[in-house]
Amino acid sequence: MITKILIANRGEIAVRIVRACAEMGIRSVAIFSEADRHALHVKRADEAYSIGAEPLAGYLNPRKLVNLAVETGCDALHPGYGFLSENAELADICAERGIKFIGPSAEVIRRMGDKTEARRSMIKAGVPVTPGTEGNVADIDEALAEGERIGYPVMLKATSGGGGRGIRRCNSREELEQAFPRVISEATKAFGSAEVFLEKCIVNPKHIEAQILGDSFGNVVQLFERDCSIQRRNQKLIEIAPSPQLTPEQRAYIGDLSVRAAKAVGYENAGTVEFLLAEGEVYFMEMNTRVQVEHTITEEITGIDIVREQIRIASGLPLSVKQEDIIHRGFALQFRINAEDPKNNFLPSFGKITRYYAPGGPGVRTDTAIY
C-alpha cells in the first residue's frame, strides 16, 4: 500500500487529495511557488516544499517534481488535474524512478491524448464517433477539401488539445480559411504541436461525460454520467449528475459505451469518457485521462470516494465496488465560481480576495482553496 504521496498540484484539488490521504493514513507532501507559500494545501499537508519563485514553472517541470518525490521519501505522485495531469512524460519519469503515478500508464495517456488516435481506437472498439477526418490534415488545402466532404459547419480541433483551447467552429469555407492559421498558432503555443483535424460540428448537442474506474485486474466500472452542457467559451460552468436529459435506456447505453472504451485501451485508474448527444444519437468526443474538476458531484450521488479509489488502484488493489452494487441517489450540481469581470465579457479578473463567505447547509459541499 502507498504510504506517502507527493501532490504535484495546488488549489482545491491539492486540498482534496490531502484530505483523502489523511483519511487513509497516508502522509501527504505539498509543493508551492512563492506565490502559493500561504495557500491552504500547504497548511493542510503533512510536509511542504518550495519549487521556486516563478509562479508556474515549478509546477510544469516533470523531472524536478519526480526528483522531489524521491528525495522526500514518497512512493507515489498524484498529478491532480490541469498542469501535468495528462503529461505522458511525467508518468514515464515516475516509472523510471520507481514512483507510482496515480493515473493511467504513459502509453494510454499518449494514445488518448492524441485525438485522432483516440478516434481510431474507439472506431475499432465499436464506439460511435462524430464524422470527420481519418487523421490529421496536412495543410489548409486538405482542410478545405475535407470541409467540403464532411459538410459545414465543421469543428477545427488541435489533435493534442483540451480544456476548450485549440478549437474553432467554422460555418463556411471562408471561416475555415481564417481559423486554420489561428488554431495552428494556438495549438503550437498551448500544446507544443501544430497537428489539427476536422470533425462535423454537432449543432446544439448535449455534452455528456461518463465517469469510469479501472483497476489492474481488468475490472472497469462506470459511475453514471454528468451533464456538462452549460458552458461559456467551451469552458464548463455548471454540471449536473446524473443528466436529467437522458432516458434510462440512454443512460445504460452511454454507461456501456464508456466501459467498452476504457477496456479497449486497457485503462487503469479514474478517467472520463466524453460524448455528444444530439437527436437521439451518441458520439464519442474524447477521453480525459485524469480526475475531473466535477468528480465531486459523482461522489455525491454514488457515495464513492473517487480519489480514494485512485490511490487504492495505484497501490495494486482491486476496485472496492462492483458494477451491480453502484447506484445513484438524487441529483447533484456543481457551480464553478470564477473570478471574472462581467462588465468586460467575463474575462478573468485577478486581485486580492478581501471577503469570503463560504456556503453551507444541508446538501452543500464546497471544494475550495480560499480561506
Image: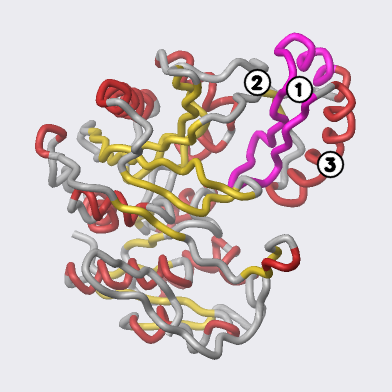
For image coordinates 31% across by 41% down, the residue present is: 242
Within-10-Å neighbours for mark 2: few <14, some 14–19, many 20+ = many
Q: Farthest residue in the left direction?
A: 325
**Dots 3, 2 in contact, CB < 8 A:** no
Give amino acid for label 2: Lys
**Dots 2, 1 in contact, CB < 8 A:** no
Within-10-Å neighbours for mark 1: few <14, some 14–19, many 20+ = some
Residue 222 at x, y = what percent? 26, 36
Nearest to the observer: residue 13 or residue 349: 349
Q: Which residue is mark 2?
A: 200
Q: Which residue is mark 1?
A: 137
For image coordinates 67% across by 66% down, the residue present is: 342
Residue 278 at x, y = what percent? 50, 23
Mark positioned earlier in the residue sequence (3 or 1)? 1
> Is 355 on the left-hand or right-hand side of 315?
right
Task: Name the mark on residue 182.
Answer: 3
Q: Which quadrant is the C terminus positioned in?
A: bottom left
Nearest to the observer: residue 26 or residue 122: 122
- Asked if residue 84 can be seen in this view, the reply is yes
Give amino acid for label 3: Arg
Inter-mark Cα distance, 2 to 1: 14 Å
| Secondary element type, mark 3 | helix
Mark positioned earlier in the residue sequence (3 or 2)? 3
Task: Name the mark on residue 90.
Answer: none
Whether 143 is drawn above or below 362: the answer is: above
For image coordinates 60% across by 63% down, the residue present is: 60
Discs 2/1, front: 2
